[in-house]
Amino acid sequence: MLNHTPFYADSGGQVGDMGVFRDSSGNVIADVNGCFMPVQGVRAHKVKARQPIRLGQKLEAVVHADVREATKRNHTGTHLLHAALRETLGKHVKQAGSLVAPGHLRFDFSHFTSVPDEELQDIEDLMNREVLKNTRVETFEDVPLDVAINEFKAMALFGEKYGERVRVVKIGEFSTELCGGTHTMATGEIGLLKILREGSVSSGVRRVEAVSGEGSLHHFRKDHELEHVLTSFIGAAGASPAQALKSELERRDEEIRRLRKELEQMRMKSASSAVSSAADQVQDANGIKVLAQRVDNLERNQMRTLVDNMRNKLGSGVVVLGSVQDGKVALIVGVTKDLTTRVQAGKIIAAVAKKVGGKGGGRPDLAEAGGTEPGALDSALQSSVDVVRALAS
């Protein structure tokens, strides 16, 4: 146990400091990977010892300055984000949770819908205007709670319990909050704030994630790398890389739709040709003409069109089509109107579908079914003549 420590403990969404313990000779004897408060007024360090630590040993507790500074930038950024959200979206916005870490910040807030990209840009602009102003960040210690709320007009944060006296953090006229965390001396130290994403946490609660300082720099470097790749890949003559990419994706999407349509037309043409050539294979079932054919890789709507065409070509009869696509069986049966008093499509397909591990139904003149055993499709189609014969007898 140390008699005192400079380490900030997990509190108010801010993560605890990291650093080291040194002995009297300046040697690092332990790494401190965080700090928390198990009870009020007591700070516990998460320590990984490099050497044995003895009772009564004199230690120097050293906070990693770069980690502390990065966390301070993100914490001050959180205050700017909160104020910018309220100014842009409305005063109903209230903090519903947060995480302030050295690498990024996360802010949850009450709001009823997603935030459009245009408004996120407005929020980002507001925050960074305050950063560019380099506004002084003032802290007022030991302020009576009623004075903080009524005179400073400070916002109390979600989930925090406050005593009779509090600490107020004020950023010009832009933001005033009750807060016990670490902050920059002025907003300019933040460097730049960049919103990464916005999304839903739960009903009525949204989340924004952002970075500041070196985190923003790393983000822009990645964006620049992506921009360079896009420019070399698709070009950007007269347009931004984002606009060029959007145009290229739209062009390729249109090309895919065109090719898909052509493929469907070719499949339909091929299937129609195959079924037409099989018309001389029509079988008789108690005086009813039956045509059963396999037409793989056709969509349901294409199979319906094909059934209609074949019924018209037969004039009077039953058409049974089966298809396998993506390992699943699709069946469709069509019966011409003049025969529905003798055989119904629903009864025919019920018997045929059982043979492919499925079931189905429909109108007397048209019925559909699915199945899970593609290997049994050929025998199921062959059996359809016997099914019609049995129903018509």
Image: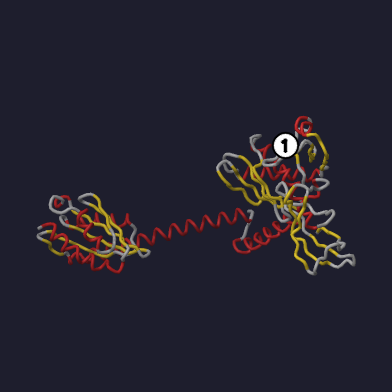
Residue at the image point whose x is 75% and y is 56% from the top: 214
State the count of labels: 1
Q: Is residue 170 above or below residue 324?
A: above
- Measured as percent of width and height from the top left, residue 16 is found at 75, 54
- Measured as percent of width and height from the top left, residue 19 is found at 79, 60
Colouring style: secondary structure
Quickly name the residue at label 1. 155
Left or right, 152 with respect to 90, comes to right
Left or right, 388 with respect to 33, comes to left
Q: Is residue 159 above or below residue 61?
A: above
Is 386 or 231 nearer to us in this picture? Answer: 386
Is 165 or 364 nearer to us in this picture? Answer: 165
Left or right, 263 with respect to 386, comes to right
Q: Is residue 281 above or below residue 106?
A: below
Residue at the image point whose x is 72% and y is 36% from the top: 155
Q: Is residue 105 above or below residue 226?
A: above
Residue sticking out furthest to the right:
25
Is 248 or 108 nearer to us in this picture? Answer: 108
Q: Is mark 1 on a helix, strand or loop?
A: loop
Q: Which amino acid does label 1 sit on?
A: Met
- Measured as percent of width and height from the top left, residue 106 is found at 67, 49
Residue at the image point whose x is 69% and y is 57% from the top: 219
Quarter of the picture holding the N terminus = bottom right
Residue at the image point whose x is 22% and y is 66% from the top: 277
Quarter of the picture holding the C terminus = bottom left
Left or right, 331 with respect to 65, comes to left
The crowding category of the residue bearing disc 1, from other C-alpha atoms within 10 Å (few below 14, some 14 to 19, many at least 20), is some
- Measured as percent of width and height from the top left, residue 298 is found at 33, 61
